[in-house]
Image: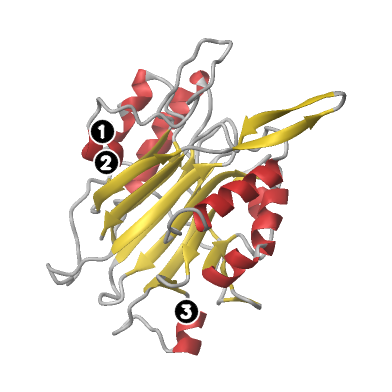
Amino acid sequence: MVTDRLWRTLSAFNRSTRSWEPIPLRNVQSQATLRFSPTLRSIDTFWTQRFSLISWNIDAFSPRHVSRAKFILSHILEESKSPDILFLQEVTPEVRASLLDDARVRAAFLVTDAEDQTSFEDVPFATMTLLSSTRFTSGLDSQKEGDGIEGGKKFMLGRVSRVILPSKYRRDALCVDIIPPISPRTVFRLISVHLDSLRDTLHYRAQQMEILANVLREPGCSGGIIAGDFNAISPEDDGLVDKNELVDAWVALHGRDLDGATWGVGVERRDGIGPGRLDKVAMMGLQAKEMEVLRPGTIEVPRPGEKPVEIPWSDHCGLRCTFTI
């Protein structure tokens, strides 16, 4: 089981690019047998913060991937309430460049993997996390703007990491630690995932979920959220969240009877596979309040000598989840 963690740098973007102090390389050994003991540190019982999260697999392989990603981003930022936290999966290097060049992103978000393409090397795509600068602040921001942890309103960003997972496809999990403004010794963890694909990798997904659940149980972590493309394509996959004693936000809010499918929605597949709830949000120590599926629009793809064909922005729907800490 590969459990090393590679610490990365998170860069803050506004009208002029800036970055905060780099985080040193560290190796942290996960404890697969650790059992969770709640250790919330001196937080007022009546203190709560409400956050909105959107997670979307933007589909790296269909035509016009950069244009489709731009439509998804515009839909997220302009046609609906802009989220506090945005998890993106299947981000290609070209899409990464497009995101970093977008004025709306530069003005309003802290963005992972902004300084280099290390996480995008030798893989077809990777994950990225965007955090609203109205809700989160980096160390450098707080020094310049006087918005430190003590007495401030924003959550401070802690360590940023990629957890290297056992994987057929070199998948990892992108983790960002956040620290409440009233409790500088308390850490919650945001984890964006794209678990292994296809039916023959169920054993990898089972290992991946166990590792990530224990990342939320590590000493000093008071809980957090795991969200993204779980590639939950089999009945066995559906049991992995419960098996690892996490809360499936969709099930908690809607029960198991309401569909919630995020993949194969509104299309007929030749292989006969129907829609599935491949994308999920799992929690520990947080409370889900609202959740909905975000359907993609369509984009025209030109075809030489033929009429253009319309395809969805992505083969996945997005998920919007509101939760409280």
The residue that label 1 is drawn on is 242
* Residue denoted by label 3: 139
Check contact, mark 2 vs mark 1: CB within 8 A. yes
Earlier residue among tags 2 and 3: 3
Quadrant for the C terminus, please: bottom left
Q: Residue at point 35% right, 31% down?
A: 260
Which mark, by number, is residue 203? none
User: Badge 2 is on which residue?
Assistant: 246
Residue located 58% across and 41% down the image: 58
Furthest toward the front, the residue is: 307
Q: At which x and y percent is residue 86?
A: 48, 54
Give the class, few, some or many, for how many residues have Cα within 10 Å of label 1's Cα (few <14, many ≥20): few
The quadrant holding residue 12 is: bottom right
Mark 1 belongs to which amino acid? Asp
Q: Amino acid at mark 3?
A: Gly
- Identify the element where label 2 is drawn: loop
70 displayed left or right of 110: right
The spot of residue 267 in percent (x, y) is: 53, 21
Residue at the image position 28 percent from the left and 54 percent from the top: 323
